[in-house]
Image (cartoon, grey):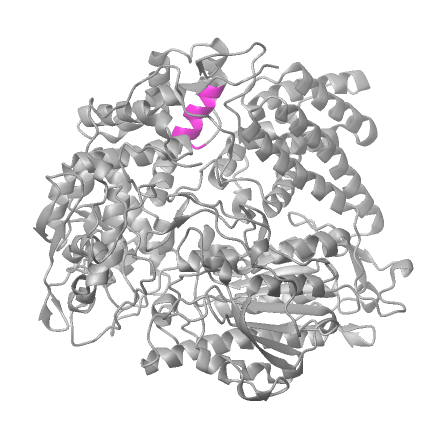
Amino acid sequence: MNRVRKDPALSRRHFLRAAGGAAVALPLLSSLRAGAAGENFPKRLVLMYTPNGVIPDAWWPQNVTSETSWDLNIIHKPLAPFKDRLLFLGGVDLKVTNDGPGGLHQKGIGGLFTGQQLQSGDLFVDGCGQRAGWANGISVDQEVAKKLAVSTPITSLELGVRATENDVQGRIAYAGAGAPLPPMNDPSEVFQRLFSGFGQNTDQLAELRARRQSVLDTVQAQFKSVSARVSQADQQKLSAHLTLVRDLENRMAITGNGSQACVAPAVPAKLDPSSEDDMPIIAGLHLDMLATAFACDLTRVASFQISTSLNHIRYPWLPSMGEGHALSHMGPSDDAAHHELVARQTWHSQLLANFLTRLSQIPEGSGTVLDNTLVVWGNEISEGNTHSHENMPFVTAGGGWYFRTGRSLQYTSASHNDFLVSILNAMGVPATTFGQADLCKGPLPGLV
Amino acid sequence: MRIVHRLLGSAGVLSLAVACSSAAPSTPSAAAAPPDDGDGLVCNADQHPAAPLSLLTRAQYDATVSDLLGDNSQPSSSFPPENQVSGFNNNTEVHIANPLLVEQLMGAAESIAGRAVAANLGTLAPCAGTSTAELTSCGAAFVTSFGKRAFRRPLSDDEAQAFNTLFAGLNATRGYSPAVELTLQAFLQSPQFLYRMDSELAATPETGAVPLDSYQLASRLSYFLTGSMPDAPLFAAADAGTLSSPVEIETQARRLLETSRAKAVVRDFNRQWLQLDSLSGLARNAPEGMVDVKGIGADYRESLLQFLDQAFWEHGNLQSLFLSPMTFVNARLASVLGLAAPATGFASVSSAPGSVGLLSQPGLMAMLAHADQSGPIQRGVFVRQRILCLDVPPPPPGLNPVPPDPDPKLTTRERFAVHTVSRACSGCHKLIDGTGFGFEKYDELGRYRTQENGLPVDDSGEMLDTGEAAVNGPYHGVVELSNRLAVSARVERCLATNWYRYAMGRVETEADGCSLREVEQKFHVSGGQFKELLVAVTASEAFRYRPAMSGAL
């Protein structure tokens, strides 16, 4: 993608809160010089989600003779340059889906990164008549954001590629029980949010901050006075909204550390987020902007989802003219469906490989941003035609500061909640349980 | 919130899950017997459903900003989409603030206020004077007049004071125009603007059912029937305190139904009721020799919406919705469907082959299909859930549903017959597939056909366990089914229920029982007139009252 190359002196920046198309930047101050000594760089977490299970025979590492001696399978061939940064975790089950309301796709996507069951209720019905509410807790990325995002302009970035199902089947990130975070599907909106205001000077920034402060102070006072006059249920809604306004105001004061690679990308062309044809371009733009957001330290936590569970999307550019969910139901004997699914899943891993490549091109101290990033890739079911929640296809990339990578591990019916605990620990969050506590024994052994 | 009672039994998303197993074919909707005066409802004047805070949807935000400031830029296009329940995006339980929305609301307020002040300062906040006292006085006038329209009621003394203080401070430090602009931003981010508030504590403790005040009623009427803030006549009625009378409410409702914004509301409802958003990403394999079908979902959607517009505004009743022979096509759809192409835009075609009402519409049939074949299951589920408000029972635990791979030598019906032959699946699927097989003469592009893969198409279906004897039984094709549904009491009640949910921004609860029954009865007595249905909703007690709040200011 073409980048806007600006005056090198201006390409090092740090940022004030971006909001509603008013992201702003100013030249890096000498006191904020990135990573002077000590190599103590921010850590980043990316959750990646792809739907409808995988073809295990083409997904899991092959020729495994030991943890460190194995070959990538067909689907992961694009990740070959990063083999020593990967960690495959076999034998991890989504035990949290064993009980509780909802259909298999609903429970899977809701529990994947929250480690929680779905709330009971009548809100959502899946195609088979199963009903449930939202996931009943915070997702691991948001738990990490509480620690990592205190000093970034944006708490976390949720990105979606045709993730346009606005119910439990379409959400992976949760700020809390029943509080899903919607993904952004349109790269031009993402650009607007992150980069549109590049180039304002310090005085302009101070003025903008002062204006917003006076407005938001009045707004917050209004929330408080209205809250005193409404029912308890309404108070909860207003109080949640007020907290978000307060957070918005607090983050205005935050400046991030920009590296040399912090250069705004070109303005993306207007694309159709509902078009399957535009999916590859949108996915590429999203991940490119995310890498830049890391380089600029606009955020340190993100999630990236390719569509939603139970979708009926074709991948015509591959070409795969079958519909995702229907294809995934085909048994192993269906060669044509098998080949299409492998091609689709290989495309997913190519996206990850492209993203890792971008991160590895962004210098940070003596290494790169990839050295300080952990990507966790999951799916709401393990296999489409069984809808099993056992032996989930989990792989991580990066996180080398904590995990011993380049390995393929085999657990026996481990709980994925413990995997989520390991992710928290890797990101510097001390924890021994996450999500449904009775499914936790502590971090997965053997990872560090 | 658990839903404890349904007039329609297990309607739509509703709660009466029915076990589906190979051993015991389900008896769905045992509770779905048509309600009548003996349905056990006790209409207690003191029992009224809650009237929760309701956050403006994107469409409401844009329309409101347009009416308030003449800003037609549709600023909500960057807002995250609302969460949905039973198809509707205005559900007060799940349409709530999230970080991205709050951030975008700030950005929208900033750009709207910037545009407003740049273009209209003189009308928005006129000021002839130049002294601080004069400017402050102009600011106070702006706060009073604009504030009332933004909050949809007069400002309280405390509110006026808060905004006057903000304005005066800004005026002193930054000048008049920036002060107006930033005060405007604060209005647009305040909860009184962003939320509709129907329940506020009174000065003294309340009991029983409490009538909404005139301003609250004005907003209920305007957001239900126009999707926007109250217009000048509604404000005038609220100011005069006359809106509390049922006659005045009906007069206003009928007036609002004739405004152009009402047209947008009906479209918004139809789009959500029938879940037409799934058409925007519609992907269909192009048949050989066919025009490019990329992006054709938008054509289908417009075609359907025009059909629905005509049914609502011109024909006006439920019977025509199911029996009108009209289809709307543009050049591309005409080409796909083998009809004469209009010179420009969309035009109506009467009595195209197989054309009978909503259920035969090419857009609907295309939506309810796969990329490469028709979709008897989607069609069956659609009719049962959206048209009849029947539950689709969940599959038995552990069942792995595997749809058949398209076999070019078989008809779609033969391929899907496995569902109804297999004992494990048949309990539920005979309900769904029996409903959907009757649509087999419409393919995945909504084209009418009598043959598939050289074999004659069998469009016999069977309606089972619908809770209405006149609907149950075998049928042949969409014409016969549509004639049955056009006079079905259950269909009538189902549509009334959906409009009620849309109007109230909630799925109904036990406390809605009496109001909903009254709405259904009026709709029935009117002979299925859509406008009478909407007027009946505004006349219902649930629309006009709220429960007493505990405590007092």
Q: Is residue B95 left or right of residue B504?
A: right
Which quadrant holds the N terminus of chain A? bottom right
Q: Is residue A83 magenta?
A: no
For the point 37% across and 79% down, the residue is: A338
**A24 over A381 or under it: above or below:** above
**B138 over A191 or under it: above or below:** above
Return the residue nearer the eye: B45 or B17: B17
What's the magenta bit mostly, secondary-structure-wise?
Answer: helix
Looking at the image, can residue B446 be seen? no
Return the residue nearer the eye: B63 or B86: B86
Q: Position of residue A328 (x, y in %)?
A: 38, 71
Return the residue nearer the eye: B69 or A370: A370
Looking at the image, can residue B12 be seen? yes
Which image quarter: residue B122?
A: top right
Return the residue nearer the eye: B451 or A124: A124
Which image quarter: residue B370?
A: bottom left
For the point 49% across and 18% down, the residue is: B215
Q: Position of residue B22 (x, y in %)?
A: 22, 58
Q: Position of residue A355 (x, y in %)?
A: 62, 72
Q: Which residues, given as a range, are shown in magenta?
A: B216-227
**B88 over A118 or under it: above or below:** above
Q: Is residue B460 left or right of residue B348?
A: left
Q: Is residue B223 magenta?
A: yes
